[in-house]
Image (cartoon, rainbow, N blue to C red):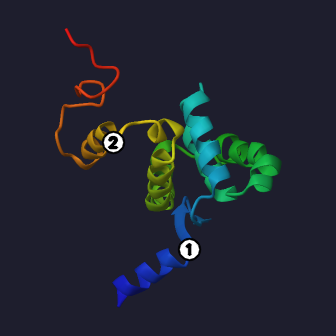
């Protein structure tokens, strides 16, 4: 029964909670804006000690307008006033990682790759080799090394 409740909670995007220094924080599945903000923080942040506080703040706000209006205040509250350390935020960051739904993202990315204009311009042999590479067949051969490819050099 517990496993079924957990599965139902994941499917219904229920709020999950984590306690950090006696403060209960709520998290839901991350929207695209929160994932974008977290990516930006990780790529651009110079102060390594502030990264966890900034990412937790972005995940807590989890929305375009909330992040635009309140993020600057919330991360400073966590970092300068509450002075959360990385070790205190580990559980929250682990829950945030769990709240990223990779399945649908990977499916959409795979489908979009198949719709690329360059895929439409390949001949049948190149498409076959490309699809086999993605599925694990004929490892090591690429469309550029196949004799029917226009990029193949006959030397």
Query: Which residue position is annotated with label 1?
Result: 13
**What is the residue that sits farthest to the right in this orientation?**
69
Query: Which residue position is annotated with label 2?
Result: 124
Q: Residue at x 19, y 31 (%)?
A: 140
Left/right placement of residue 139 relative to residue 121 reads left
Closer-to-camera residue (131/11): 131
**What is the number of callouts on the image?**
2
How many C-alpha atoms fall within 10 Å of the one at disc 2: few (<14), some, or many (≥20)?
Answer: few
**Nearer the camera: disc 2 or disc 1:** 2
> N-terminal of the two: label 2 or label 1?
1
**Residues at discs 2 and 1 in contact (Cβ within 8 Å):** no
In this rendering, does residue 126 appear at all?
yes
Q: Decide: is 81 above or below 143.
A: below
Q: Residue at x 51, y 57 (%)?
A: 96
Q: Decide: is 3 above or below 16.
A: below
Q: Residue at x 41, y 79 (%)?
A: 7
In this rendering, does residue 50 appear at all?
no
Which corner quadrant of the image does residue 103 belong to?
bottom left
């Amino acid at each position: 029964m517990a496993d079924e409740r957990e599965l139902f909670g994941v499917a219904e995007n229920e709020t999950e909670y984590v306690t950090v220094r006696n403060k209960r924080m709520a998290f839901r599945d991350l929207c695209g804006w929160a994932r974008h903000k977290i990516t930006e923080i990780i790529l651009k942040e110079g102060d390594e000690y502030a990264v966890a506080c900034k990412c937790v703040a972005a995940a807590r706000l989890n929305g375009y307008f909330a992040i635009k209006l309140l993020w600057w205040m919330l991360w400073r509250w966590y970092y300068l006033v509450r002075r959360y350390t990385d070790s205190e935020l580990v559980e929250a960051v682990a829950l945030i990682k769990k709240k990223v739904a990779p399945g649908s993202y990977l499916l959409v990315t795979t489908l979009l790759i198949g719709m690329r204009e360059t895929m439409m311009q390949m001949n049948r042999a190149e498409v076959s080799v490309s699809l086999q590479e993605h599925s694990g067949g004929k490892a090591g051969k690429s469309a550029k090394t196949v004799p029917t490819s226009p990029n193949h050099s006959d030397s």
